[in-house]
Amino acid sequence: MQDNINSIVATKDGSNTLFSKLYNQHYHNPDDGAINEALSKHIIPAFTFHKDKKELTILDICFGIGYNTFSTIYYVLQNNLDIKLNIYSPELDGKLVNSLDSFDFPKEFENIKHIIKSVAQTGQYKDDKINIEIYIGDARMHIKGLNLDSFDIVYQDAFSSDVNFELWTKEYFDDIYKLCKDDCIMSSYAIATPIRLSMNEAGFYIYEHRPVKRKITLAFKQKQETIGKFVDMDLKKQRNKEAVALYDKVV
């Protein structure tokens, strides 16, 4: 896949990602690898936390080239997990989603090509165990129409706040908080203090986790004892008076 907006990039785990010329960022860290990043930073922490659940409803922000969603299905099949998956994901670029049936995905996705094709062509897939729905449009608008207290997992994986500011603000996380069940886990590659403050001021408890060489953020509606290292955001603010959350810009 090579066009005026995205160029294909090989990553160190053998999977391919894209470099967005529009946002001047990779969809995945080339050093970590696309599938490895999806598994280690999102799927494995979330599924370890929810190891006893038989049905999971997941919000994947944002769909992009689908690695979080497709790696979730791969992980479930690879580990023979008896889980029903409901995955909902907004994505601004409909043409990108349509192009995915010709994207050079890794061999790990060989058994789910029919799912990838269906998502690329129709924006959805459904069988007895898997339900995927992709929404093409603005994520902030879309999440306001989702059912409250309905999500077990949120993959917070938008482009960085430098170029996608509106998906990292306190007001955005206010809306995400309302969608989460009491035992929801939200995972994110972002570890910057302003972003963690945005999550925390929306009501989330913040934890730090290092699944591989890079730290990640895990956020919960309730305090945890079994996963991650608690990050005291009040103490952060006391020690750094200049640290502030991100807020929607008033026009």
Image (tube, rainbow, N blue to C red):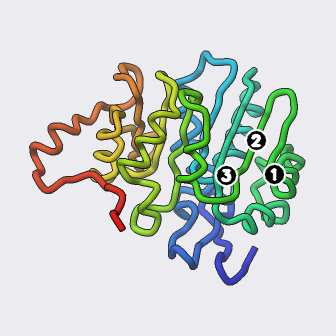
Q: Which residue is mark 1?
A: 119
Q: Amino acid at mark 1?
A: Val
Q: Amino acid at mark 3?
A: Tyr
Residue at 69%, 18% in the rendered image? 54
12 vs 170: above or below = below
Instruction: Using a 10 Å C-alpha cutoff, classify the residue at mark 1 as few (fewer than 14 neighbours), some (14 to 19) or many (20 or more).
Output: many
Q: Secondary structure at mark 2?
A: strand
Which one is earlier in the sequence, the residue at label 2 or at label 1? 1
Residues tagged 3 and 1 counted as in contact (Cβ below 8 A) = no
Instruction: Using a 10 Å C-alpha cutoff, classify the residue at mark 2 as few (fewer than 14 neighbours), some (14 to 19) or many (20 or more).
Output: some
Q: Which residue is mark 2?
A: 132
Q: Secondary structure at mark 3?
A: helix
Q: Which residue is mark 3?
A: 67
- Decide if residue 147 is on the left or right side of residue 226: right
Residue at 50%, 61% in the rendered image? 159
168 vs 164: above or below = above
Front-most of residues 249 and 210: 249
Using the numbered discs, state the Cα–Cα distance from disc 3 to disc 2 in whole angstroms.
13 Å
Residues tagged 2 and 1 counted as in contact (Cβ below 8 A) = yes
